[in-house]
Amino acid sequence: MGDRKKLSFNLKGFEPGEACAILDQAFDIKARAGLHCAPTAHKTFGTFPAGTIRLSPGYFNTTDEIDFTLEAFKKIALSL
């Protein structure tokens, strides 16, 4: 895996699957929702059974892409 990072989180007011669908359909951002093969960890963190949203930014992602993703999260959060 090297220096590849994974971000796992939730957006308040949204189920992980719902947020991922919005990211995909409205912003063409690919993310995964669920337990990510770690149900025991999610039980520990209190995110079971819905899980979390997971993003995996990599070496080739640009700062513009990261900024775009952050703006997408802001827009989703403000849509409540």
Image: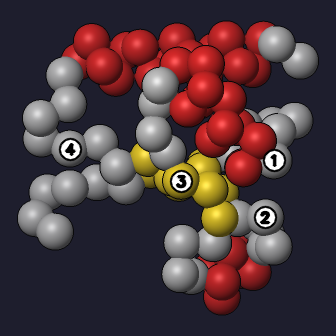
**Amino acid type, label 4:** Gly
Q: Residues within 10 Å of mark 2 (few under 14, many from 20)?
A: some
Element at label 2: loop
Which mark is drawn over residue 15? 1
Which numbered disc flags the more N-terminal residue, 4 or 3? 3
Label 3: element kind = strand
The percent coordinates of residue 68 (x first, y second) are: 41, 14
State the separation of the CA atoms marked 4 and 3. 15 Å
Where's residue 21, x and y in %? 67, 38
The first of marks 1 and 2 along the sequence is 1
Residue that mark 4 sits on: 58
**Cα distance in 3D space between marks 2 and 4:** 25 Å
Q: Secondary structure at mark 4?
A: loop
Q: CA distance from mark 1 to mark 4?
A: 25 Å
Residue type marked 3 = Arg
Amino acid type at mark 2? Ala
Of the image marks 3 and 2, the number of the one nearer the N terminus? 3
Q: Is 1 on the left-hand or right-hand side of 76?
A: left
Between the residue at mark 3 and the residue at mark 1, the CA separation in whole angstroms equals 12 Å
Which mark identifies residue 50?
2
Position of residue 58 in the picture relative to residue 34 (left or right): left
Name the residue located 45 percent from the left edge and 39 percent from the top edge.
30
Task: Give the numbered dot on residue 32.
Answer: 3
Q: Earlier in the sequence, mark 1 or mark 4?
A: 1
**Residue density around tag 3, few if under 14, some if 14–19, many if 20 or more, within 10 Å:** some
Quadrant of the rendered image containing residue 64 = top left
Disc on the earlier residue, 2 or 4: 2
